[in-house]
Image (cartoon, rainbow, N blue to C red):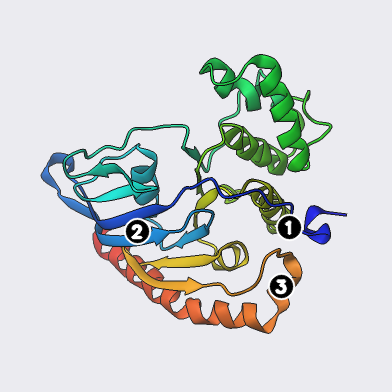
Amino acid sequence: MSALARGPVETPVRGGEIVIENLVKVYDPEGAAVLAIDDCSLRIAAGEICMIVGPSGCGKTTLLNAIAGFHSITSGRILLDGEVLCSAAQPMAATGADRIVVFQSGALFPWKTNLENVVFGPVMQGRMRGREALERGRALMADAGLAGVEDNYPGEISSGMRRRVEIVRALINQPKVLLLDEPYRALDSLTRSVMHEALLEVYYRNRVTIVFITHDLEEAVFLGHRVVLCTTRPCRPKQILGVDIPHPRDYSVVTSKRFRALMEDASEAVHEEARKAFLAGEKEG
């Protein structure tokens, strides 16, 4: 029986409120001055799963990278729990263990076991002793349904399991914010549905703020407390959809009337922006 069937085992929220105020990002390769994000404002509550949906190239990943500290901003600011991460005066946020990114492409060390991958960061950075990290890593892997593969190598487990190992590797750092950039994009639909439920099980135990970039509207509505539908470039929120389906959730909710109604509410806005992006791409090409 899954944790979802038993009911969630929740821990207190440790913070992780993100406030984005009037954010602007201009890329200027060789004077091209590409406006990627324009006057974007958004508040993400501590402990929220916030899904960001928009067309390819609209600026979603740029926004995520600005929060992480991988991209500078042009103006506006981003705050974490009231502290300024970046602003016009300090365009690049410092990277830190309070914000961890899981990218589309896997980044596990193939020559290390899954457990060694999980504990590598905090041990190397001196934030955990070896034994403490191993105990914590085993517990987190068990919570994520990975008990029994700790001593296997990444190449010996499925792609879905590798994605879970990467999320556990992020969570062992006890971040306030988990930034997920289309982590399940390469998985088949059946594996994705299992991964969605596994992510929720892990979330209920950790209550970390999650900012999740996706193109998949059904994925967004199933996982999120809110779905932020973004405009085509330049990126800004076009519509924010509150998902009033109670947690804990499992895949039975996707057949409910409320789920389908939420999908219909969002579909028109998503289709309109996708069409704009397609036409813009034709003109640019």
* Residue visible at 47% across and 48% down in the picture: 16
Residue 33 position within the rendered picture, expressed as x and y whole percent measured from the top left:
15, 50
Tell me the SS state at disc 2: loop
Relative horizontal placement of residue 46, taking residue 77 as reference (left or right): right
Comes first in the chain, label 3 or label 1:
1
Going from the N terminus, do you reach mark 2 or mark 1 first? Answer: 2
- What is the quadrant of residue 262 in the picture? bottom right
Q: What amino acid does circle 2 point to?
A: Cys
Q: Where is residue 267 in the image (x, y as percent from the top left)?
A: 49, 77
On the image, numbered disc 2 is attached to which residue? 58
Q: What residue does disc 1 label?
A: 190
Residue extending furthest front?
Answer: 12
Residue at image point 18% right, 41% down: 29
Q: Which image quarter holds the N terminus?
A: bottom right
Three-letter amino acid code at the position of disc 3: Val
The 10 Å Cα crowd at callout 3, few under 14, some 14 to 19, many 20 or more, is some
**Disc 3/disc 1 C-alpha distance (Å):** 16 Å
Q: Which mark is residue 274?
A: none
Residue furthest right in the image: 1
